[in-house]
Image (tube, grey):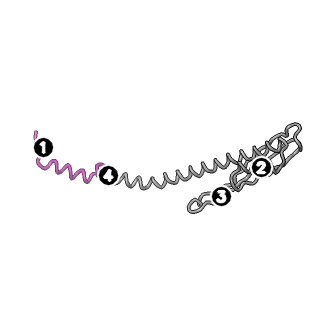
């Protein structure tokens, strides 16, 4: 069984015209060029969320430390100093008391970013902590 002499050439010409068998060189490069900005954007978003989460945790710790200090009977100034040591930069701490309850509200507006980071939203983070005054603690 011998193939016709022009059979191989005919099949090659037919393959070039058939869209299912066309050469796909460069397709991976094009797909990567489209997907890369999406992956970079996703990574930036995750880093931004991680930074906000870290500031929220620090804010919660600052509110808790301040409320516990006031509940132990420490002065308001000493308690605020303790909370400000833990809190993110630029935080505001507010202490209020009602009977035996001490409530501390901590807020921070994350710092203004520079460059293209400034395009990301900056929500106001807030934490609240409540503690009961210990027996024998000064009001």
Mark 1 vs mark 3, CA separation in Å: 77 Å
Mark 4 or mark 2: which is in front?
2
Mark before the other along the chain sequence, 4 or 2: 4
| Labels 3 and 4 touching (C-beta < 8 A) | no
* Residue 66 placement (x, y as % from top left): 78, 46
Q: Which mark is residue 24?
A: 4
Q: What is the quadrant of residue 89 in the picture?
A: bottom right
* Lateral position of residue 19 relative to residue 46, left or right: left
Against 100, is 120 above or below? below
Extent of the magenta region: 1-24
| Residue occupying the point 41% across, 53% down | 32
| Labels 4 and 2 touching (C-beta < 8 A) | no
Q: Does the magenta segment cover residue 12?
A: yes
Q: Which mark is residue 105?
A: 2
* Lateral position of residue 87 relative to residue 16, left or right: right
Mark 3 vs mark 2, CA separation in Å: 19 Å
Mark 1 vs mark 2, CA separation in Å: 88 Å
The residue at which mark 1 appears reads as: 3
Mark 1 or mark 3: which is in front?
3
Q: Mark 1 packing: few (<14 Cα in 10 Å), some, or many (20+)?
A: few
Q: Does the magenta segment cover residue 139?
A: no
* SS under mark 3: loop
* Lateral position of residue 86 relative to residue 117, left or right: right
Mark 1 vs mark 4, CA separation in Å: 29 Å
């Amino acid at each position: 069984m011998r193939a016709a002499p022009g059979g191989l050439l005919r099949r090659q010409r037919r393959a070039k015209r058939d869209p299912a068998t066309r050469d796909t060189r460069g397709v991976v490069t094009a797909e990567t060029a489209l997907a890369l900005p999406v992956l970079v954007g996703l990574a930036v978003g995750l880093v931004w969320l991680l930074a906000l989460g870290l500031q929220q945790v620090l804010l919660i710790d600052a509110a808790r430390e301040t409320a516990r200090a006031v509940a132990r009977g420490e002065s308001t100034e000493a308690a605020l100093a303790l909370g400000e040591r833990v809190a993110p930069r630029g935080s505001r701490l507010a202490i209020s008391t009602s009977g035996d309850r001490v409530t501390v509200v901590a807020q921070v507006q994350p710092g203004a970013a520079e460059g293209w980071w400034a395009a990301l939203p900056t929500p106001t983070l807030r934490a609240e902590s409540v503690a009961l005054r210990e027996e024998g603690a000064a009001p």
